[in-house]
Image: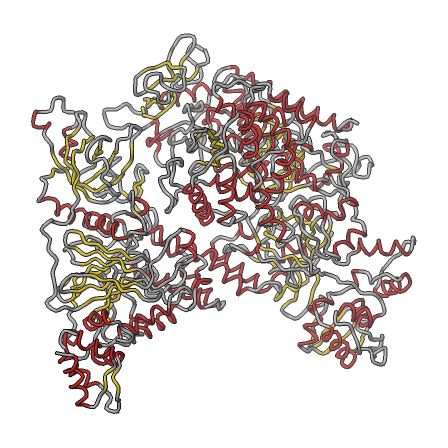
């Protein structure tokens, strides 16, 4: 069976053709020699194998990987390929160690789909060490970026190293006792500095280090040094090595069962210690997945590290918080949850599309999107009215009249996220989609419910539970309350025109509020509308005249109030919201152009001549002294040599027209023109970098003239110095044009725009600004039901590489396109390509999507634009970048910009420098070769009844996997791309506020005030706890940290920016001879949260311990910033 | 006095002696005086005199003898109420200039130094005259320190005129001399021919003169050194602490200690009276008393049990309720007023105090953390070795920017000047005592058991041990409480 349908294939072909067009243009531009290389430096790859080959730079690797993958699983293939490289079957290496290093890296690359930078950056080095018995062992140096590989790949990297070790016949690592203890101390220290998902016990660490046949080593990643086990002979550093902590704790221990599986298969000895780890600690299984008692256990982990200004929307599982609803909307799933847009507004606009929420379950966090088919919030107004809000307009109208938010409304979470997190189900509420399946079991008839009366009649006729719409939150009150309310209404109530009128009385009023019954309060009377009156009286066992139906109805009622109500009403009443999801705000949504700090137009060094703004214009009028030439500055740049005429220059193109190449030498031995990496005489690394005199003024004038541009921009910013290996500058012309179009460059030469990731599987042309013709022009011809497209309101399934961007993004990309067109015409003398003047013109253009920590871009096509400040794309597109949508963000760049302007030569020459760069471009998304998390997305139109029953039994998601339609079941067939469905619709993917209040509120104090004020109004939130948490997790650490920083601070020269560990005795800057030096930490930074902390601490009555801590800090601050002699001068001193 | 004489004397007064009481009386230096005191203090209704009675009444110093003399405590140097810092840049500069000038002056009589600027000016001069080949000296404060690719050491030193790189060749005699950041050293050597570099042949520290002789008290009074009581912590060793209080009250004192106790006249506390609050994350889980004021109230109760004739000097530490930045002032009035004994003197940290003519420098010892991280071979098990290194540098906390937080006061209070006779520290919870060129260095351990943090760091504390200093002889003995 083919993997794609014809239509799908056509789509891919279309993208490829467009891509090839762009690549041709880029290569034509590049061929002119103005850039560091003569062709585009973003190679394309069609599959995983090719991406790995490009990343590793080993020819023939792709063929070998494909060969291995055919016969075995990804994980086995990775080990096999590694062994083959080490054995010399693939690739050529000078030294055995190099082969081993490449083998281990390749294994990790295959495991991580050839997307992340971990294989290159996370494994910094492999070398050999000597055991005390004289044998050699393998040391693998892990660095910080290994984190991006994830636990499994981290652990399997070690296994691959061992596999390779056996093949090449090296000894296992035999650690010394002091080395073992060093690991214990170091990992614990790392844990206290950075975060670890799992904290291993000392014995677990000892067990692993003693037994692991590979020496897990690492580069120092932290500034802190170990105190106990220092200066060990075989460990090069006393600083903390983050890599070892990650690999041991998050890799080997957490993934022990997975590693064990492979060890068994390969029949390795020496890994028996895994059994002890598996038996000893089951960190993953013990938490969250086991809820034996069939009770919802509130989890408060999501509240940890609460930050000022980011509100809590519900304490763990507390009534009034978001009510769980199972399902998937077309814009949820894949770690994204939806709420009603009215809820977003009622939460004082703190939640917008793309805002991250830390949630109680099933995962840690989720991005938020509007889904208006859900239920909205219920609020109490100052006048006592209780109002249900389910449209944005009325939400805005009443937002200032709210005294209490009784209920946050629903939150939609999909089956797939529970499966992905292996989180036991919590009970589903009784919802319409379940009820209708209950009814279908009883009758095939179509029924219609218009009134409460209809609902009761149907329940009685077919013996099905009461329809959810008429089911109240009985579980939030007690059976006693039920009886009280029933008696109270019977005794004091009267019915007028179907409305129930009750004298205002606190207890009954509160019970009605907790049930979420709509009501008005007028003249000390509570008025309940007719439909609610009917349902309420029935549920309380009252007749239409409010008399008690039975003789002794209140005897022997069930303690569960909903059962009591079932008895009283004679129909089954189900639990309406058994599970509430606690939540707080995580990071705000993002939609912003990427700037470096400070922003840069061109990667061209100006040194100190550009001032703090790094201005090229300032630099071109700079002169060091009166005798020096104006505009001549001294900066470090790479030397290049012309192969034709032998001229030495800094430019990529020689005046004679030939393309130049870097010119290496040894500055110590004064040898030039070396081709080796190290100097043959002294052995030091060779370099092409030298301090050179550059006449910026002349260069700048020539660039302007060549372009035919005038200086019609305010500022042109360069960089202070280049940080790439060969220190290759960009052509100045690119900067001039960027400044002209007001766009900024990133460290790799590209222009980027960042957006929060949100998923979408189906779109409505109207909401993304498309007409029917436009949609058809993009290759869409049918809607979700297979009907031809005739209206912009139809729901259409999204192609996997089409993306929807924010309007702010479009206005930036329009400028980017104008820049590229200018660049093509004026610099490369090629025809303009984009010719974009409006948003509409951008539709259909190709972009590169690229996530941080990764090195592989994904080809995307702009489908349309939205009001939301986020980037909507198919979950597969996000998964291809190895992102999910739990609040992650990444960037897009125009394809031609990437192809023409990206260069490896600009990348920083340091650890992690190759991250976040398009080292390779994936042309086509193959669902099999993207992040496996995306395979757990459910694509059904309705969850089956068995699913709902399973949730009530607290079953594991795996138990019902067979009855759910998942992406994983469609892999390898055309259905992997098409025919997805969703359970809940939404009319606008950008409804609700465009930006979170967190972003629109100005000062931290305003944000904090708003956060606490919202907490005060939310029934599900304990604002005192919020205040305490904010103080403890944000303000106190800030105060303590800054106080410490103040008293150990560095100093800085305002003139040249030089930093000093302590002030020089001369007082002024010795580097620039006399520059004024200032503190880097000021009193203001130390004290900024002091007052506000104390005031909220007192106002909200936080525990004494916290108040005392604050008071002690206040004392410290006073003592540090107040002179004893002067502060004692009071009025009395003058009398 | 013979055994029988003693028995007789007391029998005449109507008392019978138990054997241990007899042993104690005859073992004392002046049995007559002791008997007199015993008789005047005994309850007339008593009949049998036990050893306990002797200890309680007679040995417990009464208003006579050494312990009866009025206390003699003079504060020489203390930041309390003298803090002028308001946290601006000039103060930081002034602070280091003060350090440089005092420590530099200490070395000026040993080497004749030149301003660094004068060496730099020679740079670039083609042919140095023959005199330039001669060794010259500079005095500077260390601003950077690293090892070159070839294994030589490169030290950046600066004075108020400029800064120069000092090269210590890896095969020279001084290549193993530890040099710390921000300490003031004197360097002798030759400037390299191309200038900007100075090749060192010797390095000197301000150090203590060989001729230094410790002062002594005329009276054989004894001072007990304690620190790191950590009242309020759940690992505070209350039982041991109470036996210490019993001991100074003369209860359950063994014979060999009786004399010491009788002469005990001073207790010096080098910080960390209480465990404090919020000193490290999650501390509330390891606290027995959560309220900081309650911690001090409890401490005051303990200190009230110290006999009135013993004078106490209390200096704060990093767990106490004063500013964390050093120098720390004395505990605030609010807390001082909880201590009802008027025999307590509150001082800052560090503080120089003269007791019966013997000069004490009390410093809690936060800088030992920085020293252990930066000084090869230094460890928490031997704090006295670290203190020797500090004394050589005549500075309690040379390294800036590490664990020690500083308040930029106009004077560098960490400079060890004038020379003390005793430097008393704590902080690291281990006991260590040694003498360097006449100065007694003592770290006084702790009253807290091993904490979670220490377990992880593999630090074994020496709890409930007290160094006792005989102010007349200068001798030190260590008494241990509990098991």
In the picture, measured across the screen, residue B321 lies left or right of residue B353, that is right
Q: Nearest the camera: A800 or B302? A: B302
In the picture, the quarter occupied by the N terminus of chain B is: bottom left
Q: Quick check: B182 above or below A1001? A: above
- Residue B422 is situated, as x and y percent measured from the top left of the image, at 19, 58
Which image quadrant for residue A775? top right
Q: Quick check: A501 above or below A204? A: below
In the picture, the quarter occupied by the C terminus of chain B is: bottom left
Q: How many marks are shown on the rendered structure? A: 0
Identify the residue at image location x=17%, y=74%.
B28
Q: How did the renderer colour the structure? A: secondary structure
- Residue B167 is situated, as x and y percent measured from the top left of the image, at 22, 32
Q: Nearest the camera: A839 or A1130? A: A1130
Identify the residue at image location x=72%, y=44%.
A330
Taking the image as drawn, is residue A746 in sight?
Answer: no
In the picture, measured across the screen, residue B49 lies left or right of residue B76, that is right
- Residue A771 is situated, as x and y percent measured from the top left of the image, at 73, 36
Taking the image as drawn, is residue A178 in sight?
Answer: yes
Which image quadrant for residue A728? top left
Q: Quick check: B106 above or below B124? A: below
Question: Among all residues in the image, which is located at the extreme top?
Answer: A645
- Residue B57 is situated, as x and y percent measured from the top left of the image, at 23, 81
């Amino acid at each position: 069976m083919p993997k794609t349908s014809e239509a799908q294939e056509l789509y891919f072909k279309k993208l490829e053709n467009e891509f090839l067009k762009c690549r041709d243009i880029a290569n034509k531009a590049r061929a002119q020699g103005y850039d560091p290389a003569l062709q585009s430096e973003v190679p394309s790859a069609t599959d995983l194998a090719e991406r790995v080959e490009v990343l590793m730079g080993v020819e023939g690797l792709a063929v070998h990987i494909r060969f291995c993958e055919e016969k075995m699983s990804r994980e086995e293939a990775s080990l096999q390929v590694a062994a083959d490289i080490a054995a010399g079957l693939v690739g050529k290496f000078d030294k055995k160690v190099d082969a081993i290093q490449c083998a281990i890296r390749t294994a990790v690359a295959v495991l991580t789909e050839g997307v992340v930078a971990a294989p290159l950056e996370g494994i910094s080095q492999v070398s050999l060490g000597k055991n005390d018995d004289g044998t050699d062992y393998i040391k693998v140096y892990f660095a910080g970026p290994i984190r991006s590989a994830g636990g499994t790949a981290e652990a399997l990297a070690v296994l691959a190293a061992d596999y390779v070790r056996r093949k090449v016949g090296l000894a296992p690592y035999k650690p010394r006792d002091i080395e073992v203890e060093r690991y214990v101390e170091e990992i614990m220290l790392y844990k206290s500095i950075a975060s670890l998902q799992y904290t291993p016990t000392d014995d677990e660490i000892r067990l692993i280090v003693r037994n692991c046949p590979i020496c897990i080593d690492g580069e120092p990643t932290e500034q802190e040094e170990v105190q106990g086990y220092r200066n060990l002979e075989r460990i090069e550093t006393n600083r903390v090595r983050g890599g070892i902590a990650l690999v041991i704790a998050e890799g080997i221990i957490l993934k022990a069962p997975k590693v064990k599986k492979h060890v068994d298969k390969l029949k390795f000895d020496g890994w028996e210690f895994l059994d002890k780890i598996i038996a000893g600690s089951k960190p993953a299984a013990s938490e969250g997945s086991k809820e034996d008692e069939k009770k919802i256990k509130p989890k408060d982990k999501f509240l940890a590290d609460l930050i000022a200004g980011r509100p809590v929307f519900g304490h763990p599982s507390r009534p009034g918080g978001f009510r769980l609803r199972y399902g998937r909307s077309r814009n949820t799933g894949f770690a994204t949850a939806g709420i009603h847009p009215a809820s977003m507004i009622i939460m004082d606009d703190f939640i917008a599309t793309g805002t991250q929420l830390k949630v109680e379950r099933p995962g840690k966090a989720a991005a938020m999107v509007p889904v208006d088919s859900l239920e909205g919030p219920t609020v109490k107004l100052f006048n006592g009215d209780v109002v249900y809000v389910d449209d944005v307009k009325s939400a805005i109208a009443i937002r200032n009249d709210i005294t209490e938010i009784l209920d946050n409304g629903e939150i939609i979470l999909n089956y797939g996220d529970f499966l992905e997190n292996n989180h036991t189900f919590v009970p589903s509420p009784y919802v319409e989609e379940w009820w209708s399946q209950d009814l279908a079991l009883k009758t095939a008839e179509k029924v219609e419910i218009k009134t409460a009366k209809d609902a009761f009649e149907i329940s009685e006729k077919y013996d099905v539970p009461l329809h959810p719409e008429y089911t109240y939150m009985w579980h939030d009150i007690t059976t006693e309350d039920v009886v009280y309310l029933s008696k109270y209404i019977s005794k004091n109530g009267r019915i007028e025109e179907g409305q129930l009128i009750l004298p205002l009385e606190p207890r009954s009023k509160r019970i009605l509020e907790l049930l979420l019954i709509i009501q008005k309060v007028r003249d000390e009377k509570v008025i309940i509308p007719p439909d609610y009156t009917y349902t309420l009286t029935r549920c309380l066992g009252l007749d239409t005249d409010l008399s008690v139906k039975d003789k002794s109805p209140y005897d022997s009622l069930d303690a569960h109030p909903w059962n009591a109500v079932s008895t009283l009403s004679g129909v089954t009443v189900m639990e309406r919201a058994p599970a509430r999801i606690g939540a707080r705000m995580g990071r705000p949504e993002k939609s912003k152009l990427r700037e470096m700090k400070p922003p840069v137009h061109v990667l061209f060094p100006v040194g100190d001549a550009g001032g703090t703004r790094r201005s090229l214009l300032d630099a071109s009028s700079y002169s060091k002294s009166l005798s020096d030439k104006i505009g001549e500055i001294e900066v470090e740049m790479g030397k290049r040599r012309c192969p034709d005429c032998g001229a030495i220059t800094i430019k990529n193109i020689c005046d004679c027209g030939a393309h130049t190449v870097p010119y290496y030498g040894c500055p110590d031995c004064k040898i030039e023109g070396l081709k080796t990496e190290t100097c043959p005489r002294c052995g030091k690394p060779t370099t092409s970098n030298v301090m050179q005199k550059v006449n910026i003024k002349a260069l700048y004038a020539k660039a302007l003239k060549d372009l035919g541009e005038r200086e019609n921009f305010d500022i042109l910013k360069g960089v202070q110095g280049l940080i790439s290996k060969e220190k290759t500058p960009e052509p100045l012309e690119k900067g001039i044009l960027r400044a002209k179009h007001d766009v900024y460059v990133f460290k790799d030469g590209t222009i980027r725009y960042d957006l929060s990731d949100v998923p979408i599987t189906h779109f409505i042309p109207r909401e993304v600004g498309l007409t029917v013709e436009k949609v058809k022009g993009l290759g869409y011809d049918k809607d979700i039901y297979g009907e031809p497209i005739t209206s912009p309101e139809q729901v259409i399934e999204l192609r996997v590489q089409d993306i929807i961007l924010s309007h702010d993004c479009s206005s930036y990309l329009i400028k980017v396109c104008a820049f590229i067109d200018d660049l093509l015409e004026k610099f490369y003398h090629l025809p303009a390509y984009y010719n974009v003047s409006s948003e509409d013109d951008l539709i259909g253009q190709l972009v590169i999507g690229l996530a941080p920590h990764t090195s592989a871009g994904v080809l995307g096509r702009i489908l349309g634009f939205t009001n939301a400040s986020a980037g909507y794309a198919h979950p597969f597109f996000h998964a291809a970048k190895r992102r999910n949508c739990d609040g992650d963000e990444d960037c897009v760049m125009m394809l031609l910009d990437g192809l023409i302007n990206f260069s490896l030569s600009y990348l920083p020459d340091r650890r992690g420098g190759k991250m976040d760069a398009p080292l390779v471009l994936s042309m086509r998304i193959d669902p099999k070769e993207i992040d496996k998390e995306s395979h757990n997305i459910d694509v059904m139109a309705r969850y089956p009844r068995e699913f709902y029953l399973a949730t009530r039994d607290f079953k594991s998601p795996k138990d019902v996997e067979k009855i759910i339609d998942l992406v994983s079941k469609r892999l390898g067939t055309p259905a992997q791309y098409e025919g997805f469905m969703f359970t809940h619709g939404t009319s606008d993917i950008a409804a609700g506020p465009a930006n979170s209040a967190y972003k629109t509120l100005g000062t931290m104090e305003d944000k904090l005030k708003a956060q606490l004020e919202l907490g005060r109004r939310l029934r599900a939130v304990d604002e005192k706890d919020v205040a305490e948490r904010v103080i403890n997790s944000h303000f106190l650490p800030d105060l303590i940290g800054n106080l410490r920083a103040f008293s150990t601070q560095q100093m800085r020269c305002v003139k040249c920016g030089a930093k000093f560990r302590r002030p020089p005795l001369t007082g002024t800057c010795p580097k620039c001879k006399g520059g004024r030096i200032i503190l880097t930490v000021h009193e203001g930074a130390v004290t900024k949260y002091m007052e506000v902390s104390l005031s909220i601490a007192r106002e909200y009555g936080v525990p004494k311990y916290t108040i005392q801590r604050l008071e002690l800090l206040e004392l410290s601050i006073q003592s540090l910033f107040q002179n004893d002699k002067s502060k004692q001068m009071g009025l009395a001193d003058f009398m | 006095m013979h055994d029988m004489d003693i028995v007789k004397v007391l029998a005449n007064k109507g008392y019978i002696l138990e054997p241990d009481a007899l042993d104690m009386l005859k073992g004392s230096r002046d049995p007559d005086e002791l008997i007199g005191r015993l008789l005047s203090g005994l309850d007339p209704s008593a009949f049998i005199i036990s050893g306990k009675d002797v200890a309680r009444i007679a040995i417990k110093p009464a208003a006579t003898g050494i312990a009866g003399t009025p206390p003699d405590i003079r504060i020489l140097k203390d930041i309390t109420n003298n803090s002028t810092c308001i946290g601006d840049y000039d103060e930081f500069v002034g602070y280091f200039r003060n350090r440089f000038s005092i420590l530099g002056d200490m070395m000026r009589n040993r080497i004749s130094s030149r301003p660094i600027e004068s060496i730099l000016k020679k740079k670039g001069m083609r042919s140095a005259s023959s005199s330039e080949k001669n060794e010259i000296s500079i005095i500077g404060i260390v601003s950077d320190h690293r090892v070159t690719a070839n294994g030589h050491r490169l030290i950046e030193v600066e004075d108020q005129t400029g800064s120069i790189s000092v090269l210590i060749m890896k095969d020279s005699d001084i290549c193993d001399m530890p040099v710390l950041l921000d300490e003031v050293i004197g360097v002798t050597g030759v400037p390299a021919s191309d200038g900007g570099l100075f090749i060192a042949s010797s390095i000197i520290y301000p150090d203590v003169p060989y001729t230094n002789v410790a002062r002594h008290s005329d009276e054989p009074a004894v001072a007990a050194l304690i620190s790191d009581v950590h009242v309020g912590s759940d690992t505070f060793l209350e039982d041991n602490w109470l036996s210490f209080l019993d001991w100074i009250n003369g209860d359950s004192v063994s014979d060999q200690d009786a004399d010491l106790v009788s002469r005990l006249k001073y207790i010096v506390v080098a910080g960390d009276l209480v465990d404090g609050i919020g000193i490290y994350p999650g501390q509330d889980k390891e606290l027995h008393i959560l309220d900081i004021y309650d911690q001090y109230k409890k401490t005051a109760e303990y200190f009230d049990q110290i006999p009135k004739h013993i004078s106490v000097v209390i200096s704060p530490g990093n767990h106490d309720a004063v500013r964390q930045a050093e120098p720390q002032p004395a505990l605030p009035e609010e807390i001082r007023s909880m201590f009802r004994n008027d025999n307590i003197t509150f001082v800052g940290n560090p503080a120089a105090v003269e007791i019966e003519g013997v000069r004490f420098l009390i410093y809690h010892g936060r800088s030992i953390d920085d020293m252990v991280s930066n000084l090869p071979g230094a460890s928490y098990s031997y704090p006295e070795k670290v203190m020797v290194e500090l004394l050589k540098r005549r500075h309690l906390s040379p390294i800036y920017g590490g664990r020690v937080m500083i308040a930029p006061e106009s004077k560098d209070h960490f400079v060890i000047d004038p020379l003390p006779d005793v430097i008393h520290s704590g902080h690291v919870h281990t006991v260590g005592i040694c003498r360097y060129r006449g100065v007694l260095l003592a770290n006084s351990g702790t009253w807290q058991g091993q904490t979670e943090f220490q377990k992880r760091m593999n630090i074994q504390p020496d709890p409930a041990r007290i160094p006792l200093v005989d102010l007349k002889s200068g001798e030190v003995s260590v008494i241990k409480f509990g098991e």
